[in-house]
Image (spheres, rainbow, N blue to C red):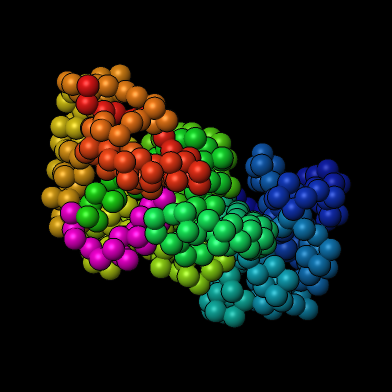
């Protein structure tokens, strides 16, 4: 690698030696720039020449005062590179004031070997993230600036996503409050027609489940599958009914945070996502919790949703919780989601066996090993026979054509994942329940009964 010394009098284009005025573009489209400050023109020319092929623009100033004026009137500056020894205002003094104007931009100091104490002061007092020695090494300086700009862009992107989330939550909260009032009214009118009274929180959950279904048929189907598996596991674990209801509701909307995700993020498997898409996907657990803050009644459900991607050994997201620090509902939903994704009807009659084979090595790593028996039971009970392959003595029939006396070979669920009729003989009472549910909650169209 070559070491660069400032050169003499080579002329550079006037526009590269002048502060650039604010560009009238949205902030996210504004070109990223760096500001170089040094009282020696030949130093600034050498820096401008070094950065000529980089994908950012270079602003220059010959004093701290001039540099502060540029910072006050210019947007899009993502990094400041300043000399330490300058008249009137040292690099340390300049960086202290620059930090007030542009706190997110990395600040770097250029200094000679004799100025090490000044460099330390620049770091401690001026907030400089790095100091580089004159004469500089070209490759080292380029890498330092590139790394600094990358960190600046990551900070700004996080701020943009946070602002977007806040705006989205504010808008969504208003819509939810309006629809919740309407749902409560309808709920009171139909309360006598359902088997078990619903709380207002249930109504909100069902509304969000409908929104997920409208946003993506894939998300709606996955939610219903996960709900069925979760209900099987919570029953096997003999949890209190109130706890089972909370976990079931959380399972119904566990992917709520994906409502605002781009279509590409929803359509792809996580293994196929780009880095940007993966970051969007990983944010959905926190977004889901934020959405449910519209009602204190939903706080526990929101907490379960936040942690439904935590892993038993602590390598999950968003908080890296481990073991029993992960809420039980989150552990169950994560496991149910894995089972749903692992199930492939194309595997034929071995499909369920393939799921249990995939489960075995990750129990105790990704998932709570105490849930193994419940998970295996759910695989056996809930996963259907492969699509297009009916079990011996089984036939399909439209739900609307079910008659008393028929024997169901599979449970009937509503489009919201609610268990309506269990496997077994369909009695007259059960048929009345089905009819009532059809008035209020759409059911799956097809049922399976014994021939």
**394 sits left or right of 217 in the view:** left
The residue closer to the viewer here, 88 or 257, is: 257
- Is 241 colored magenta in this rendering? yes
Q: Where is residue 365 in the image (x, y as percent from the top left)?
A: 20, 52
- 25 vs 383, nearest the viewer: 383
In the image, which residues are magenta?
A: 236-252
Residue toward you, 69 or 163: 163
Q: Report the residue at 43% width, 41% height from top.
A: 435
Q: Is residue 206 above or below residue 391?
A: below
Would residue 189 be visible to someone looking at this image?
Answer: yes
Query: Residue at the location (32% across, 23% down)?
Result: 396
Examine the image and state in which quarter residue 271 appears. top left
x then y, percent, for residue 4: 60, 50
Q: In this view, does 280 lie above or below 171?
A: above
Q: In which quarter of the image is residue 175?
A: bottom right
The rendered magenta stretch, by its main secondary structure, is classed as helix
Q: In this view, does 42 lie to the left or right of 280?
A: right
Residue 89 against residue 179 in the figure, above or below:
below
Would you say residue 379 is visible in this rendering? no
Of residue 157 and residue 362, the one placed in the foreground of this image is: 362
Q: Which residue is drawn at 22% across and 26% down?
A: 450
In the image, is residue 280 part of the stretch drawn in magenta?
no
Quarter of the C terminus within the rendering: top left
| Count of picture labels | 0
The picture places residue 174, in percent across and down from the top left corner, at 67, 62
Tell me which residue sits at (32%, 45%) in the image: 429
Give coordinates of residue 121: x percent, y percent. Answer: 57, 79
């Amino acid at each position: 690698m070559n070491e660069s010394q400032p050169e003499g009098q080579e002329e550079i284009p006037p526009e590269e030696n002048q502060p650039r005025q604010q560009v009238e573009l949205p902030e996210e489209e504004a070109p990223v720039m760096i500001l170089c400050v040094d009282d020696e023109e030949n130093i600034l020319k050498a820096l401008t020449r070094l950065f000529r092929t980089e994908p950012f623009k270079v602003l220059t100033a010959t004093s701290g005062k001039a540099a502060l004026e540029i910072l006050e009137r210019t947007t899009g500056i993502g990094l400041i590179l300043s000399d330490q020894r300058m008249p009137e205002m040292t690099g340390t003094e300049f960086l202290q004031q620059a930090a007030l104007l542009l706190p997110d931009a990395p600040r770097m100091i250029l200094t000679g070997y004799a100025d090490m104490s000044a460099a330390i002061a620049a770091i401690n007092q001026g907030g400089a993230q790095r100091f580089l020695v004159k004469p500089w090494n070209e490759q080292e300086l380029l890498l330092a600036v590139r790394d600094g700009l990358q960190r600046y862009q990551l900070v700004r992107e996080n701020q943009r996503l946070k602002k977007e989330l806040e705006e989205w939550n504010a808008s969504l909260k208003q819509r939810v409050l309006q629809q919740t009032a309407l749902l409560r009214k309808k709920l009171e009118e139909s309360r006598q027609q359902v088997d078990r009274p619903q709380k207002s929180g249930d109504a909100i959950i069902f509304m969000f489940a409908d929104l997920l279904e409208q946003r993506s048929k894939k998300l709606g189907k996955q939610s219903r599958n996960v709900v069925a598996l979760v209900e099987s596991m919570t029953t096997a674990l003999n949890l209190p009914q109130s706890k089972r209801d909370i976990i079931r509701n959380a399972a119904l909307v566990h992917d709520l945070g994906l409502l605002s995700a781009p279509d590409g993020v929803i359509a792809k498997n996580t293994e196929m996502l780009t880095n940007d898409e993966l970051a969007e996907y990983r944010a959905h657990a926190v977004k889901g919790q934020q959405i449910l803050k519209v009602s204190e009644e939903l706080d526990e459900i929101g907490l379960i949703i936040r942690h439904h991607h935590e892993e038993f050994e602590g390598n999950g997201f968003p908080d890296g919780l481990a073991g029993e620090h992960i809420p039980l509902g989150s552990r169950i939903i994560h496991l149910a989601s894995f089972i749903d994704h692992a199930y492939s009807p194309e595997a034929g009659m071995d499909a369920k066996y393939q799921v249990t084979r995939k489960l075995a090595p990750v129990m105790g790593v990704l998932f709570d090993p105490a849930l193994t028996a419940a998970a295996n039971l759910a695989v056996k009970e809930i996963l259907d026979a492969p699509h297009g392959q009916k079990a011996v003595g089984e036939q399909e029939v439209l739900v609307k054509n079910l008659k008393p006396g028929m024997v169901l070979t599979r449970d009937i669920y509503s489009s919201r994942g609610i268990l309506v009729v269990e496997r077994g003989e369909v009695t007259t009472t059960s048929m009345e329940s089905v009819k009532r549910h059809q008035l209020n909650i759409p059911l799956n169209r097809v049922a399976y009964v014994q021939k």
